[in-house]
Image (cartoon, rainbow, N blue to C red):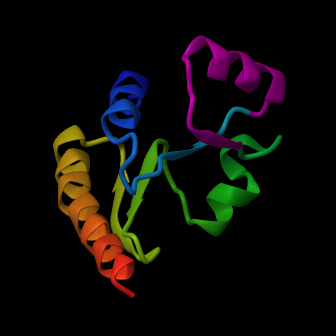
Amino acid sequence: MYPHERSLVKEMAGKPFALIGVNSDDDRDYVKGRIAEENITWRSFWNGPKGTRGPISARWNVGGWPTVYILDHQGVIQEKMTGFNKDKFDAAIARLVPLAEKALEGKKGD
């Protein structure tokens, strides 16, 4: 997943798009090393020492890893995937980013 995420972050630079990750490893030092190794440049939160049973996954009702949530520009969940489906993920991004751009254009006239 990381290579695709890295390319997406580059492709979406300057657009209304944010990628946020949550790491479920229970060892924070290991997480820091992996972030550096994998060149993760986007915001990535640590789920805490309970790993997959940490507070973020509990609050977001994550039952499997990876779980991907795609939110629109208003913060509404548009997609939830357990596992990673590249085609579904890319289609949602392709649909939602133009809507966010259009909403921003509308605000420029206010």
- For the residue pair 71 and 100, the one nearer the viewer reads as 100
At 66% from the left and 63% from the top, the residue drawn is: 58
Q: Point out the stretch of residues depicted in magenta.
A: 26-45
Q: Which of 47 and 64 lies nearest the eye of the viewer?
A: 47
Q: Quadrant of the N terminus?
A: top left
Image location (x, y in percent) of residue 20 = 54, 47
Q: Position of residue 42 (x, y in %)?
A: 56, 37
Q: Residue at x 74, y 59 (%)?
A: 55
Q: Is residue 86 above or below residue 37?
A: below
The residue sitting at the top extreme is: 37
> 109 or 2: nearer the eye?
109
Is residue 61 found inside the magenta-colored segment of the image? no
For this orientation, the residue located farthest to the bottom is 110
Pick the quarter of the image with the C terminus. bottom left
Q: Residue at x 47, y 46 (%)?
A: 19
Q: State the image coordinates of residue 17 (x, y, percent, origin top left).
A: 40, 53
- Left or right of 49, for residue 84: left
When asked about the image quadrant of residue 8, the answer is: top left
The answer to whether residue 83 is above or below residue 92 is above
Residue at the spot 25% in from the left edge and 42% down from the top edge: 85
Residue 57's image quarter? bottom right
User: In the rendered image, which quarter is residue 45 located in?
Assistant: top right
Left or right of residue 51, residue 80 in this image: left
